[in-house]
Amino acid sequence: MDAKEVIARRVAQEVREGMLVNLGIGLPSMVANFVPDDMRVFFQAENGVIGLGQRPPDGMEDRDLTDAGGGFVTAVPGAASIDSAMSFGLIRGGHLDMTVLGGLQVDEKGHLANWMVPGKMVPGMGGAMDLVTGARRVIVAMVHAAKGDPKIVPECTLPLTALRRVSLIVTEMAVIEPTDEGLVLRERGPGVAVEDIVAATAARLIVPDEVPEMVLA
Amino acid sequence: MDAKEVIARRVAQEVREGMLVNLGIGLPSMVANFVPDDMRVFFQAENGVIGLGQRPPDGMEDRDLTDAGGGFVTAVPGAASIDSAMSFGLIRGGHLDMTVLGGLQVDEKGHLANWMVPGKMVPGMGGAMDLVTGARRVIVAMVHAAKGDPKIVPECTLPLTALRRVSLIVTEMAVIEPTDEGLVLRERGPGVAVEDIVAATAARLIVPDEVPEMVLA
Amino acid sequence: MKRALKPAEAAEMIPEGAVLLIGGFMGVGSPHRLIDALVERGVGGFTVIANDTARPGKDIGKLIDARLVAKCIVSHIGLNPETQRQMIAGDLEVELVPQGTLVERIRAGGVGLGGVLTATGLGTVVAEGKPTVEVDGKTYLLEKPIRGDFALIGARQCDYVGNLEYTLTAHNFNPVMAMAADTVIAEPHHIMPVGMIPPDAVKTPGVLVDHILERLI
Amino acid sequence: MKRALKPAEAAEMIPEGAVLLIGGFMGVGSPHRLIDALVERGVGGFTVIANDTARPGKDIGKLIDARLVAKCIVSHIGLNPETQRQMIAGDLEVELVPQGTLVERIRAGGVGLGGVLTATGLGTVVAEGKPTVEVDGKTYLLEKPIRGDFALIGARQCDYVGNLEYTLTAHNFNPVMAMAADTVIAEPHHIMPVGMIPPDAVKTPGVLVDHILERLI
């Protein structure tokens, strides 16, 4: 199982029956593949649909039905079209149960930076600032380090996405929960030792006596 | 022709091709009867329809299609259903070309009072404050005096509906335009002398040399 | 999937003193059967936020008649003398709000905005005691968001997941209120299987709706 | 009734330096033929307000490629390296706005609100230089309304009076932008006779639409 699949499988366990969930582009979008088929969950694409479905069959694509990355999708029975005002009304009004987003950095306060690298990459924040500010649960799904550089740091050096503390950080090495006391190590990745996690993390980690390994059924 | 018909016929002349018009309950609603049949005008009922039509045939009434007074109406071909947010978005956003409202008092500044009489009548402002604040043109349609008491006064003694200066006052006796200089008498009612208007008006009136009589074709 | 509730079951959920957002405009689009069930049950002390209190013996008017309402926040009570009587007697607190301001305040509560900046009400009694904010040299009233414990929503039809459709002038406050309460109870005339309402026809996504009343017919 | 315009006729109406609201999300729901006509005509210096600038060679990206845009106000440019290149070279001014804030600012411009009070962007670079407003002990950014000279709207279909329907993820910014410009030009795929679109299906009332492009098919 590669790193991304570990992350996507673990994040999928956070999804509960009846939730409205927004998945970011890239790695976060893989989470949908690991949610049980019989679980009634609505995925929101912030560009305008509640009830996002799988890729359409070849030749059946509709140019007016895409995800936020512009990729062709379908909609499930019971889906609803929404305009951008309704879409972000849901996000900012606290109606979105969970969002899963990628991250560039997360710090000891649980602050996320994920929208720009000054001088190098200025893609714009898109809906990220609204999602992190407004969603009930914010889950950061990212690989633990970028080419050896820790992404979980004492304090973000990149521009913040929001002042809101994220709910959970899921990497291929660990599940980490930001709390009032700091970052608490909740779970280890498959076959990963606590010392390896601490070594790959620049931020101070609070390590409980017991750190169970992720159960990726 | 009774006083109300004079007023409604004269106000109808202010309606122009292509306008979106909101008519208040009561006397203002009579204006629609005197707009030429071939003039393309959309009437808005602020409770939720653009393209308000006549009363339905007996037995054809729909309890889900009424005007703002709760009376049964129809909708014309090309009508649109709108919720209250869109309805008042149109009104407050400057999309409503004209509103016609009743009045209790109008003063020399062109301020309107039409929503309460302290201690006697507290119906609530409904949409009146939004309409007077937001519509492009605000026309007050009212009888000139209430049981002998002038309704056009130096300064409103009743609570104001808005600080916005109304565009035109139409009564059975006169058409009066509020301006920077004050209230200008623009037209006389059928068979009404200027002296009679001045006598029935508590506010100072600016009387031009020529005050033509209303032409009620 | 949601179970269809009997009106009495839904009424049981609503505790004494709850803050209720109730859709409808002079009863059009109101949740008629829910209101009857509340009257039947007789538990009160409610704060009712609605466009109006309809008429005595009709829709929200029945809640007033039964003295189940301690406070109401509405734009208009002119057609309900009983509301006025209870208000003058000091038995019922009434806060009158311009209709457009009322719908925007509820929308702000639903979409997570901090308030509404509006020109409506400036220079009138509505502005008394409220802060103003200057933007580019223009002054606006700051009106606060409104939320309810429950939203009681009248709808034309829904599907099993709670997607709602409204019709004609029965939209009014319903779509906005469905975003602004902790618990949303919808009362549809009809209920259809999932997939029967096209996504583009959905005006309130089912994810916003917590409970559905049984069909009327 | 409106006359169906050729794309070139519509493009002729838009003067150099105009402020354009352009619907679409990564090109989905954009007014494709209008954009092509603007590129064909070659008059520029526009300020473009939109969700994004699509990709090079696609939709709004074509306006960027043709260097017709002097400034853009958008939420995301990550998929258009040409936009980033012109920005870094100083040829194109780019204002990045969180997507939910962008749609609310345009809505505020359209419905006559003085601004938007939002938590999104607090504590980030988005907040720099902007006033904050405190409401009940919570702090909000004050974001200003946005309006355009023209709104260029992509729609699924319309009738002769301009009532618009949208579909699936092609709604996005279109319905909100159609309220926020002095002149609204709609580009429908299909055009139908008046009365063929049910009032409940209309999402932008025809009274908001000034001009209609000829049908696509």
Image (tube, coloured by chain):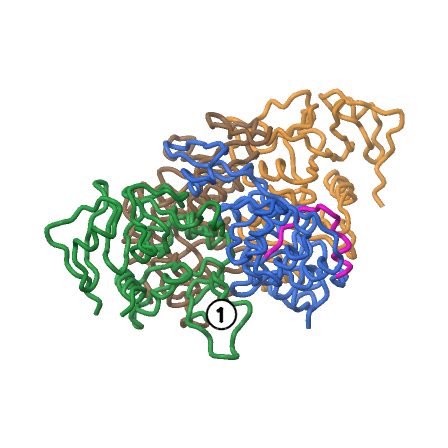
Chain colours: A green, B orange, C brown, D blue
Corner quadrant of residue D9: bottom right
- B215 sits left or right of A164 in the view: right
Q: Quadrant of the C terminus of chain A?
A: bottom left
The segment highlighted magenta reads: D8-23
Question: At x 42% / y 39%, what residue is drawn?
Answer: D122
Q: Is residue B144 above or below residue D2?
A: above
Question: At x 52% / y 58%, what residue is drawn?
Answer: D79
Q: Residue furthest left?
A: A209
Q: Is residue A22 visible?
A: yes
Question: At x 69% / y 62%, what residue is drawn?
Answer: D36
Q: Is residue A205 above or below residue D137?
A: below
Determine the secondary structure under disc 1: loop
**Magenta span includes A107:** no
Corner quadrant of residue B109: top right
Q: Tag 1: Cα neighbours inside 10 Å, few (<14), some, or many (≥20)?
A: some
Give coordinates of residue B75: x percent, y percent: 63, 59
Give coordinates of residue B162: x percent, y percent: 60, 31
What amino acid type is highlighted by mark number 1? Phe
Residue B123 or D122: which is nearer the viewer? D122
The residue at which mark 1 appears reads as: A72
Give coordinates of residue D90: x percent, y percent: 61, 44
Q: Is residue C55 visible?
A: no
Chain under disc 1:
A
